[in-house]
Amino acid sequence: MLLEKMLQSQGFGARKHCQQLIKNGAVCVHGEAVTDPKHKLDLNGLAFSVYGERFEYREKVYIALNKPQGYECSHQATHHFSVFDLFDDVLLNRGLQCVGRLDQDTSGLLLLTDDGQFLQALTHPKKHVPKVYQMHTADPVANEQIARLQQGVELRNEKGVFAATEVQRLAECQLQMTVHQGVYHQVKRMLAAVGNKVEQLRRVQIGQLDFSSLNDLAEGEWVYLSAEQAALAKFRAESS
Ligand code: URA
């Protein structure tokens, strides 16, 4: 691939801007300055720098963010910060999107990508990717509430029944459960349907990608996922 095209693909702006960066001597490939925009590159294991900042070539990006409360999953956040405020322009220029949404007051594992197929595989309603949530509830969780969550509840204006699996009481007012759809406010509405209320909600797993495997990301921190980790998140997506 030509150097100018590679830079453009990685989010460094329009082709003309990338050409200018290269001609200005801002771009080094494997440690050597390259000033020819048409320089041909082998993309395998490619590392480059722009004004001294190091980057690795990534055909697509897969990112796991520890979403803090108070951030919306939309580009034009209205009442809160946007999760996109946590990323620099180089990533945003690539067309980064949230893989599904978390409410502004929900924290935990949020994936972002510029890979449309990956996004579709995780969010298509027919794929039923399991997602694990932990929550604090307003009232003690009763056995009967757990049983009703497992049997399934109806939610207003939604078709079908919404059942949780692997429902575990973690403490008197703390619950963990897995849901298999992704309708608006699903977990909060399911708890309301059984007569309780979610006070705090955190997502801890998507597919087989467990948050605890991501090395204690602090709130607001993110990491690139390897191809293997991204595949774990899709687990069940392709087989269902
Ligand atoms: N269910 C909810 O109610 N809120 C979320 O943010 C995610 C799932």
Image (cartoon, rainbow, N blue to C red):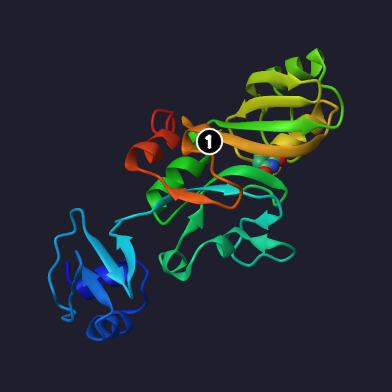
Q: Is 102 in front, or is 81?
A: 81
Q: Residues within 10 Å of mark 1 (few under 14, many from 20)?
A: many
Give the labeled residue for mark 1. Answer: 211
Q: Which quadrant is the N terminus positioned in?
A: bottom left
- Image spot of residue 76 (x, y percent): 63, 67
From the viewer's perspective, tell me whether residue 70 is left or right of residue 21: right
Location of residue 17 with respect to 164 vertically, above or below: below
Q: Residue at x 45, y 46 (%)?
A: 120
From the viewer's perspective, tell me whether residue 50 is left or right of residue 113: left
Q: Quadrant of residue 70?
A: bottom right
Q: Quadrant of residue 136?
A: top right
Q: Which quadrant is the C terminus positioned in?
A: top left
Location of residue 21 with respect to 229 vertically, above or below: below
Q: Is 195 in front, or is 14?
A: 14
Q: Secondary structure at mark 1?
A: helix
Q: Is 4 in front, or is 123?
A: 4
User: Is residue 21 visible to us here?
Assistant: yes
Q: Is mark 1 within 8 Å of ligand 1?
A: no
- Image spot of residue 88 (x, y percent): 48, 67
Q: Residue at x 60, y 39 (%)?
A: 182
Assign ligand 1 to one image quadrant. Answer: top right
User: Is residue 100 visible to us here?
Assistant: no
- Image spot of residue 115 (x, y percent): 39, 53
Q: Residue at x 67, y 31 (%)?
A: 134
From the viewer's perspective, tell me whether residue 48 is left or right of residue 197: left
The mark tally for this picture is 1
- Image spot of residue 121 (x, y percent): 43, 42
Location of residue 13 with respect to 154 vertically, above or below: below
Amino acid type, residue under disc 1 in the picture: Phe
